[in-house]
Image (cartoon, rainbow, N blue to C red):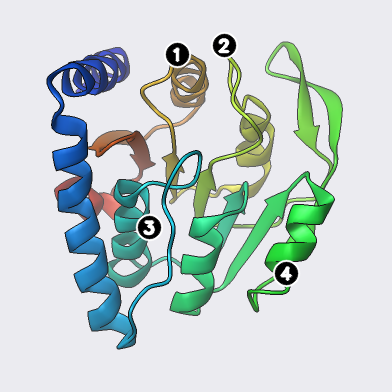
């Protein structure tokens, strides 16, 4: 499906499901699948709290499957929270980045992988001045875009700068909050510069996954 068509589908599904009350039912489905998969993988009951502005269950489900079923070598997370705890629980090679120092310090006490404090500085990214994480990105083949805070348009546009620098030819990128116009601006711009396919996950929130052939099995998640 073309980029614009999938983005429109994400917005339509989100608002239709919100109106008819099926968002909660969809999220319950992902909660059940995630909890069962987590227990099967780790033998433990998950201590996750996907509420309010935190990662929802469809995002945790997507991360769980990507990190346990795909040939991901190193993961970068922009924005910390429940997903950071999942990365740690799965023991994957990951780096988590956030611009709020107290939050980074709190998360660093809970997980074993690197938690990087990166204050926001203004930079020019794809023609716009936006707040960007002040850190040097190395090579990653999976990136979760879930920070910094969203904006009405060109939301998390700074992620484009990071993705330009850290992605090779084969990659998987998960854009959270993908039913929002601001995030869709960023996905659309990303796709103008990358040869990738898109896949939509829809729970109580939406995720759009950009992927290359190495990770194509994600379209069945």
Point out the image quarter for the N terminus: top left
Please report contact status of discs 3 and 1: CB closer than 8 Å, yes or no: no
**Pointer 1 residue:** 181
**Pointer 2 residue:** 153
Please report contact status of discs 2 and 3: CB closer than 8 Å, yes or no: no
Residue 151 position (above or below residue 213): above
* Distance from Cα at disc 1 to Cα at disc 2: 6 Å
* Distance from Cα at disc 2 to Cα at disc 3: 25 Å
Q: Residues within 10 Å of mark 3 (few under 14, many from 20)?
A: some
Q: Secondary structure at mark 2?
A: loop
Mark earlier in primary sequence (4, 2): 4
Q: Secondary structure at mark 4?
A: helix
* Distance from Cα at disc 4 to Cα at disc 1: 32 Å
* Distance from Cα at disc 3 to Cα at disc 4: 20 Å
Viewer-proximal residue, 61 or 165?
A: 61
Horizontal placement of 52 versus 201: left or right?
Answer: right
Q: At 59% from the left edge and 25% from the top edge, which residue is drawn?
A: 150
Tell me the quarter of the picture where residue 177 sits: top left
The x and y percentages for residue 89 are 47, 77
Mark earlier in primary sequence (3, 1): 3
Mark earlier in primary sequence (2, 3): 3
Tell me the quarter of the picture where residue 38 sits: bottom left
Horizontal placement of 144 versus 109: left or right?
Answer: left
**Pointer 3 residue:** 63
Please report contact status of discs 1 and 2: CB closer than 8 Å, yes or no: yes
**Pointer 4 residue:** 108
């Amino acid at each position: 499906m073309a980029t614009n068509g999938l983005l429109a589908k994400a917005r339509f599904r989100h608002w239709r499901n919100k109106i008819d009350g099926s968002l909660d039912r969809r999220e319950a489905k992902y909660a059940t699948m995630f909890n069962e998969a987590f227990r099967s993988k780790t033998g433990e009951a998950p201590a996750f709290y996907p509420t309010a502005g935190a990662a929802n269950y469809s995002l945790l489900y997507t991360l769980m499957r990507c990190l346990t079923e795909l040939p991901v070598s190193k993961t970068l997370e922009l924005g910390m929270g429940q997903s950071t705890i999942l990365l740690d629980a799965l023991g994957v090679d990951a780096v988590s980045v956030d611009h709020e120092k107290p939050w980074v310090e709190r998360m660093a006490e809970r997980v074993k992988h690197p938690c990087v404090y990166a204050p926001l500085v203004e930079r020019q990214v794809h023609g716009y001045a936006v707040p960007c994480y002040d850190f040097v990105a190395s090579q990653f083949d999976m990136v979760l875009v879930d920070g910094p805070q969203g904006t009405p348009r060109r939301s998390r546009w700074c992620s484009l700068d990071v993705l330009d620098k850290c992605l090779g030819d084969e990659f998987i990128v998960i854009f959270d909050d993908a039913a929002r116009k601001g995030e869709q601006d960023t996905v659309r711009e990303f796709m103008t510069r990358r040869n990738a396919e898109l896949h939509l996950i829809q729970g109580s929130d939406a995720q759009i996954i950009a992927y290359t052939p190495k990770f194509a099995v994600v379209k069945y998640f």
